[in-house]
Image (cartoon, rainbow, N blue to C red):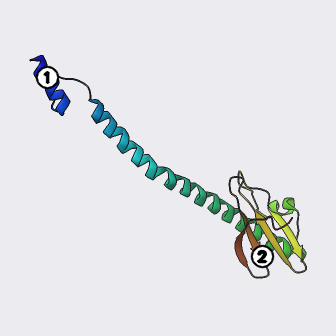
Amino acid sequence: MDILRRMRTRIGLRHPSDRGFTLVELLIVMTILGVLAGIAIPVILSNRGKAYKATMASDLHAAVLAEMTWNAEHETYTTDVLDLTKHGYVMSEDITPVHIKVTGKTFVACLKHTKSSSWLVYDSSSSRTSSSDSDCAA
């Protein structure tokens, strides 16, 4: 009887009274989990990058609105972030303070998430937002 049980176990047939999993079953489950993890991890990392960009866009939009409000009241632009906070700009966590460069009657504002490699830049002369690898106010 013991020999018959061993043969069934080797070919994958198990007796109902046997408990536990065979090594093959455990390896198959581990392989499936590995494949699923290989699919899920890049998706999660991609979504994290999108969240950084959304936070940057939201902060830049708030900074630009505060800058426009400042301009409407003082007929000039400011480069001081504290002036912008008086007009509703609140910086999110992990965002560099907005950098503003005034050129005549226009301004360029940029900011960066600490975990992102690129800067988000707004140019008031063209009313466009773009990405840049370098700080616009440097």
Q: Residue at x 55, y 53 (%)?
A: 45
Where is residue 69? Give x, y as percent.
80, 72
Q: Residue at x 14, y 28 (%)?
A: 8
Mark 1 nearby-residue class (10 Å; few <14, some 14–19, many ≥20):
few
**Vertical position of residue 3 compared to residue 38: above or below:** above
Q: Is residue 65 left or right of residue 49?
A: right
Identify residue for label 1. Answer: 5
Distance CA(mark 1)–CA(mark 2):
77 Å
Q: Residue at x 26, y 29 (%)?
A: 22
Q: Is residue 98 left or right of residue 55?
A: right
Secondary structure, mark 2, is: strand
Q: Hey, which residue is sitting farthest left in the picture?
A: 1
Q: Name the quadrant containing residue 28.
A: top left
Q: Is residue 85 visible?
A: yes
Where is residue 101? Give x, y as percent.
86, 70
Q: Name the quadrant containing residue 122.
A: bottom right
Residue kind at label 2, given as amino acid type = Asp
Q: Residue 29 versus residue 119: which sits nearer the camera?
A: 29
Where is residue 20? Give x, y as percent.
26, 25
Q: Residue 4 versus residue 54: which sits nearer the camera?
A: 4
Where is residue 26? Give x, y as percent.
32, 34
Identify residue for label 2. Answer: 123
Residue kind at label 1, given as amino acid type = Arg
